[in-house]
Image (spheres, rainbow, N blue to C red):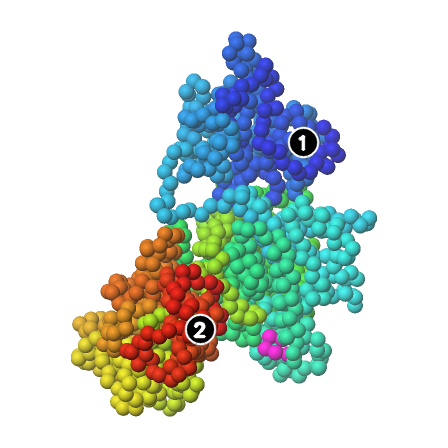
Amino acid sequence: HQEPQLASLKGGLVQPTMSKLITNSGTGTKERDGRGLAHVSFRVRCDKIGHGDSVFLCQADDSVAGTRIPLFTTAKSYPWYITRNPLSLALPITESSDNVTAKEDSLYRYRYAIYRAGVFLHWENSSGCGSNQEFCRDASARTHSDGVHQVPVRLFHPGELYTVNDVLGVTVDPPDIDHIKVRQRFSSVGSLARKNSSNSATSLSGLNPGRSVGSAAITDSGVSKKKVGFAPQPSSNHTSNSCTPGKQAVHLTSSDGLIVVSAFLPVHLTRSNHGEWSADWDYEALLSMQTHLRVTRVGTVKWRGWHGNVGGGASSESGVPIDERHKVEAALRHFNCVPVWVPTNLFGEMYNGFCKGVLWPILHNVASVYSSPTGVNSGKPDAQKHTEPYDSDFAEYCMDDVAQGPIHGDGGREGELWAAFTAVNRYFTDVIIQCFNEGDLIWIHGFHLMILPSFLTRRISMAKIGIFFHTPFPSSEIFRTLWCREDLLRGMLNADQVGFHLFEYARHFLTCCRRLLGLNYGMFPDSSGGHNLAIDTNGRHVSVTSIHAGVEPPVLHQVLSHRSTLDRVDSIRSQFQGQVIFAAIDRMESLKGIPLKLIALERFLQRCPEWAGKIVVVQVGISAFERGDDYTKTRNEVLSMVSNINERWPKTVQFQECAESEMRLQQRMALLKAADVVMVTTIRDGLNLIPLEFTIAHLDALKELGEGDRKRGLCILSEFSSCTRVMRGALHVNPWKISEIATAFYQALTMSEDERRRRVSIASEFVTRVTTQRWALAVMLDLKGVQKNEDAGRYAGAGLGLGFRLLGMDSGFNSLDANSVARAYRNAKSRLILLDYGGTILANDNLDGLQRFQFVKKSRPPSVPKDRLISTLKELCSDTRNYVFVVSGKERHSLTKTLCHISNLGLAAEHGMFVSWPTGKVGGKRRWETLVPNQDQSWRSIAITIMEVYTSRTHGSYIEETEMKVLWQYRDADPEFGYLQSRELEDHLSNVLRGFSVDILHGGVEEGGYVEVRPKGVNKGVVSMHIIKNMDRIDERGRLEFALVIGDDHCDEPMLSVMRQIGHRAAETRSGKKEGLPLSPLPATIAQVDVSSCDVYISPRMQCFTSTVGKKPSAAANYVNDVDDVHELLESLVKVTSRETVHSGFYSVVDLKSMSESSPRPVLKPVLSMGELHRSQAVLNSHPQARISTNLHEFLGTIEQDEEDEEDIFF
């Protein structure tokens, strides 16, 4: 085999069959019913393959790897790779004695090939030294027999299941084989795979190479074979599922699709002089890891001029040329990477202008309140280069002003940057939609794409979307300084999962959602039976995850063992021989705290001059041109301080500035390996993997055989860095306290050997346990486990622009069909209409906290209904078939003042505590009844006294008293403190008022923020049932055939829920009399109430319509948009009533079409003459006249119609 030929091989998978692997196969095979086939899974441990490499199983005599079978791994089972399904191996026929000998001499011969990005890399190296042997990458220098595994055929029997365990590169010893007894014979590998996939226990097709399938490794003689030393013991194939019934564990399989979205693709592009493009993985990028999932990566590519800065000393190019983009796409196709082509100037505005100039400082808790107009990408020149001394002194106190830019407004500049930010997110949306397949998970990374979920949910609402932040998240007091804060938060909340590296950042995010959007959060149950931290928003739960990322030890060990890395380490050690090396690698910006580190070094040397010349600080500064003035200021300050220190203590600080491309993983690991102590003194930082990489580089420091007297492996770590929570063995310092950093220098130099070993051991615990793949797997499992109904009807969109939000609705939650309501209204003989007052038929006065307070204190008059609404209610009440009630939470006097002059209108005040039945008397005092006995009022004074205590210590809270209830309002108080006080007040009242017949209700911030005490058993649901049971007190109209119920807020939900259940029972009665499909059950979100006591008052033909005002989660079956829609609906019902009154017995063609479907044989009334139109309807009913038809229409009017009703009537 020749190396040029091997290097040109590319992908193309084959079916899982290995019948050609027999080198001395005998005469034939018997494959019928599986009697000549053995089913074998190949499993190999790969410790030394590169990050992102793939492993394939090949035939021994296949020198070009034309027929190869992929092996897969998971984050849990790494470094074990296994075939996805068992392979079918043909066995020789063994009836004759000659064939027995042939079988004894037959061998299966195979080997493993390593591929990278679909391109052949090398064969495994044959060695007897185990996996510690380095792989030989020169395939042409090896013989044909190198790296070939072989296993005797006699170990396999037809129809049995086996697992062959190998170690990559170890071909001297025979492989370890696990034999699994198969009681049932299978006709094909497909049936075997189907059987295994249906088993509740771990199966071979489940891709869990970390555990062998089967009981014990048994040879033909029944003697147990030895296990591979580092392989976990195999588990039984018949173990019961650990999950309890109804709880399904979440797994990721190779069939799962994943779209990983980031601002930049984790690849390096290279362009030859001939215009050919090639790509390679950026191995130090967090998202370059390989997995068994079907992964598609979406992002932009970094090429000259990607930032849009063209000319003027910058790049002469402007990104990838348009006519060469197809070549780049072809080069990235092997990596499953899809580029997003964004105009470079637009991307530069987004990245450098908005992300780095606006979001970056805010996310790092920096608000530029005192910043000058000149800032990053502000476009304004420096107005004055020279400053007075006191100005410089004042600037020293404004050191926290890192990014001076358009954060708080800059003459319209913020509008341009925001437009660029939204435009780039739309570019990403279009590409993701093209790559998306149903069922794929979408994982977004970075703050550059904060609003991307808003655009995605508009078009693929059923996709599970996660967004992960690799930066800190600021406190609410800092984040609220952004003018676009609500849009950013809503963009994140349109995802199904939001991830952070630390709970501290997650806590800030939760607080922002609570304070700025009024949302609640807590622990909510998940699909697997556990509970997850989530935010409750619009009927959905947005999961919040906090998992810190790790590093990949195999990749770092491979880099450290490279010859060039070792040479670089020796060079650094020899340069500073005999000195303790303190290393630091930071970007040149104020947030990294380089000046604080140098000040502490100077103080340490002043107090401990004996260490001068014995230590050296190697400070590497990475240029951060995107930081603008902050980079220039930081660089000048660092150079000045380094010069001053070296002038007093020569060669103490070795400072070197370089570009990011010059300090890649290999150069960085060489410096960290040569250093004794690493220092990170950032004043605010997100993900920083340098301490983790340093710990991996010094794991050998735990061994007894150290390197002389070197005290290495310690980290001096700022407590403001994310990894400080997981690096418990580091020396934690407050970078703002210079004395702590100086003390850390002394501790690192004088620490005892036992303590140093203990700290290194503790620090190594996390880096060896939590790898990048384990971090990604944990986040992906959380995302896949998010409860998201597969029914698209459960979700609806609301809002325009970036105010769009995804609402979790019950299935079938649609706009109320006014036509259906009017048709049912027309055909009903007994109707009930229940209407809420404020927010339903009248504009809501409680939307604003100040208005609510003024109404309570009676310093502002409430809104009153207009004449048009009064007229509509009068018309509805004048129909003798209607029962109309206004059910409100307001007091009796408020309703009496505005609605008492409407005859036949029923009123229910204070959520139904007081009921006034319809009456024909107008203007006088109304007679009110109480829903429940309310004799003992002594609880009121007790409740008010307790509430006054909490009011005095909770600013923004006040007490509201009515005839029936007492409320403690905290809607204007601090959201979190007010909620804590309300919970304490709720507990206090529950204990004190235990002996009274009262209910204590707690409404959250979304419901207005209150604690209410009212008589027990009073709500709008109870009063609605009370009205139905007592309608005969008004008159005898028969059973109820129509109900319309409309409300707008949480106080109306009991009424909507009860009436919907009553309507559902009537519909069930109708469906029971007809043969047809059963009704769908009510949504689980509806609180079940026993409404069977109302059955005798409800007609089986009753049609109930429940609606909420506004598109939001509700117990109602439908919704209307606003109060005006309610008015239009009521006016349409009035038209139906007036039409019947005016036309009396006349019916048009439209009337004939609208006959009720519930009446099987509708009868038309005879048409009256013009003279009879002037008679009253009562006279006509009491004195029917037999008369002769005078025309054909009258004659036809007496004939019963047998035809069914036709299409609906539209108003």
Q: Which numbered disc flags the more N-terminal residue, 2 or 1?
A: 1
Q: Nearer the viewer, residue 858 or 390?
A: 858
* In the image, residue 408 lies in the stretch drawn in magenta: yes
Q: Amino acid at mark 1?
A: Gly
Q: Nearer the viewer, residue 396 or 576?
A: 396
At horizontal 37% and vertical 56% (from top left) the residue drawn is 1079
Relative image position of residue 439 (x, y in whole percent): 53, 50
Q: Which residues are magenta?
A: 406-410
* Vertical position of residue 1035 compared to residue 266: above or below: below
At horizontal 37% and vertical 86% (from top left) the residue drawn is 855
* In the image, residue 548 lies in the stretch drawn in magenta: no
Residue beneath disc 1: 66
Q: Nearer the viewer, residue 244 or 499?
A: 244
Which of discs 2 and 1 lies nearer the camera? The answer is 2
Q: Nearer the viewer, residue 245 or 1129?
A: 1129
As drawn, the label of residue 1191 is: 2
